[in-house]
Image (cartoon, rainbow, N blue to C red):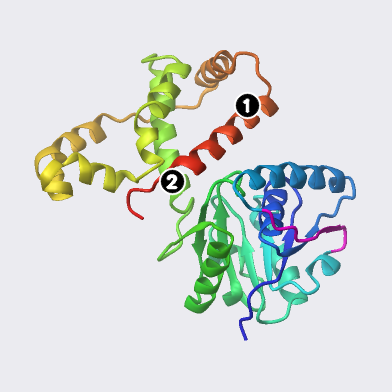
Amino acid sequence: MNQPVQHLAIVGAGMIGASWAALASAHGLSVSAYDPHEAARERFLGHVERARAQLTELGLTGDGPVAFSTDLATALAGAGFVQENGPENEAVKRALLAQIDVLLPPDAIIASSTSALVRSAIVADCARPERVVVAHPFNPPHLVPLVEIVGADEGVVERAAAFYRGLGRRPVVLNREMPGHIANRLASALYREAVYLVEQGVASVADIDAALCNGPGLRWALMGPHMTYHLGGGEGGIAGYLAHLGPSQVRRWQSLGDPSLDAETQAKIVAGVAEEAQGRSIAELESRRDEGLLAVLKARTLVSE
């Protein structure tokens, strides 16, 4: 039947779950969230309220109801789509997804948020694994559009992608599973070199961060690395860039580091971040991040779209 999703179930009512709940509610969907701990209720609803206020700034003024339950079956009742945000633990996710699978009608889609676990492992105990996809967002998902999707059934993947597009997200579909998917692998490669620069004493933590966000990071908010070098090739585009400057890329690759996260390097990073944070709390820094994200989302024009 594949009817449009009207009711979203959230499994795992932490910050990620609250962010998804706020986004769905702002698009007019009804939402029910599950967490086994009653103590999570107040914190969850508080996160939803704050996220909804931010979404209002982006013109999203829907007001779908948001409910909370400590009973999984109650939260799943009537859901056409489930966003699972449980702990990043393979055994826990396998058991949780299998439990969700049993409680849902066959046409409902289950989407699991995992940063690095592979889909084939976490769906191993499901009776209907074909209707389970990995759908990995970036934090906070109500502001950051990316959703990475991994699935085995083409029709299910397209339905999941359509659902996220309906929430204003930008789904990308992997042709095959890979630990860390796409964006976390790119981020990990970058962070490895950032740690190496700290380890080698090349620059301070603050200056390394500043070099990224005041340089390539500005371009990367508008276009990815391939399009960036396409423009870097001038009239010859990416073909010209690879022909003339490809060897310089190879030389840089060969000089990249393989740092150790030993106690000394960790201490350098911790001290450097403390200096960069200038005494501001995590909550203050998150607020500044979200203000910046809102401003970027309002202003940016993607080069390739």
**Residue at 61% across, 69% down:** 124
Question: Residue 123 location in percent, x, y?
Answer: 61, 68
How far apart marks 1 and 2 lie (CA) works out to: 25 Å
Disc number for residue 285: 1
Quadrant containing the N terminus is bottom right
Q: Residue at x 65, y 14 (%)?
A: 279
Which stretch is magenta? 61-71
Q: In the structure shown, which secondary structural element does the residue marked by tag 1 occupy? A: helix
Residue under the point 44% across and 40% down? 187
How would you rate the neighbour count of disc 1 (Cα within 10 Å): few for under 14, some for 14-19, many for 20 or more? Answer: few
Does 245 sit left or right of 208 as displayed? left
The image position of residue 125, as x and y in percent, is 66, 71
Q: Which of marks 1 and 2 is nearer the N terminus?
A: 2
Left or right: 130, with 49 as reference point: left
Left or right relative to 231: residue 295: right
**Residue type indicated by callout 1:** Leu
The secondary structure making up most of the magenta span is loop
Q: Which mark is residue 185?
A: 2
Q: What residue type is labelled 2?
A: Arg
